Amino acid sequence: MTHIPLGGSTGSSSRGTSSSVTVAGTSRSATSYGSGGGKATTIPSGQIFAGRTEGGGTRDQVFGSSTYGSGYPGITGRGVAGRGFPFLFWPVVWGGAAGAGSGAYLHDTEYGSPDNTSRPGGPMMTSTFVSSASTSLNSTLSPTTFHVLADNTTLISLISAITMNCSTNINTSSSTSNASDPNPYNASDSNVPQPESAIEYYRASSVVLTLDGYNNSAVLSSDENATNTPLPGGIDTTLQDCLNQTIGAAVPLIDGATRVSTGPRIEAMALLSLVIVFLQLLV
């Protein structure tokens, strides 16, 4: 899959929009097309996931792969158990009880259920994007349906960016084209995206792009290095690439810059200046 260069895809907006995201009871600003970054810190005692690191993730570190647990800067291997939060958002959860076997890593329960409202950005939601290529009289492509799965705040932001950048490739009558349209992710519904249909994870596996009809048996293999099942032929790769590039460029990142109050420093310098002037008058 093609990864974007920094700066976004052709036709994407470089003007990010900010949303408020609650992280551990604190409101933080997340900006689409933002650069992220900042200093990684340790979550203090008394808070959920105390002792793990959070923050520091940048835009050029957003892309993962089709492996659950990818998209973590500097970390390889599948699974998300015990990991920190380089982008502050929690990884997506696929639901279901944790169990034994090669696929157990897909159903870790430490981040709660998909409808957990304490997740940064809110509960997990899904959106649908159907290719318009199959509606063309000259097209030989079969209908291609993609889904994006993420927290509510992230998904609302991405729907706007995708609609702006990929509208010519989307069948709007069959797709999520309005930011108010994402659906709650119900893990017990067999029609919702499954881990076997994932084709790309982003932002420390907190966002995933899936393809209907794709069944990647490698995710259930006991061999972490198992070869991924090739994507089916005849899909709309133009829409696939547009979705991939737009998510990579526009997925909201927590602003890395922190506001530093310079008031006391300025007041102290002003007072020192007055003292110096007063002493000069006495000479």
Image (spheres, grey):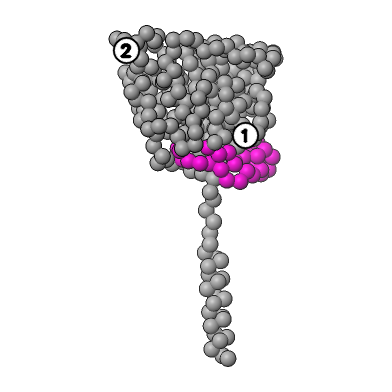
For the point 49% across and 30% down, the residue is: 4
Task: Please tell me whether residue 80 belongs to the stretch shown in magenta.
Answer: no
Crowding around mark 1 (Cα neighbors within 10 Å: few <14, some 14 to 19, many 20+) is some
Name the magenta segment's main secondary structure.
Answer: loop
Crowding around mark 2 (Cα neighbors within 10 Å: few <14, some 14 to 19, many 20+) is few
Decide which of 234, 90 is in the foreground and name it: 234
For the point 61% across and 46% down, the residue is: 39
Residue 263 seen:
yes
Decide which of 133, 253 is in the foreground and name it: 133
Tags 1 and 2 in contact by the CB under 8 Å rule?
Answer: no
Decide which of 10, 37 is in the foreground and name it: 10
- Is 245 left, or right, of 51 in this rendering? left
Instruction: Relative to 50, say whether 188 is above or below.
Output: above
Which stretch is magenta?
A: 31-59
**Which residue is labeled 1 in the image?**
73
Residue type of the residue flagged with mark 2: Thr
What quarter of the picture does the C terminus occupy?
Answer: bottom right
Task: Please tell me whether residue 36 belongs to the stretch shown in magenta.
Answer: yes
Spatial CA distance of label 1 from label 2 is 40 Å
Q: Position of residue 188 (x, y in %)?
A: 52, 15
Locate residue 48: give its quadrant: top right
Q: Position of residue 228 (x, y in %)?
A: 60, 14
Locate residue 60: give its quadrant: top right
Circle 1: element type:
loop
**Which residue is labeled 2 in the image?**
135
Instruction: Relative to 279, say whether 99 is above or below.
Output: above
Residue type of the residue flagged with mark 1: Pro
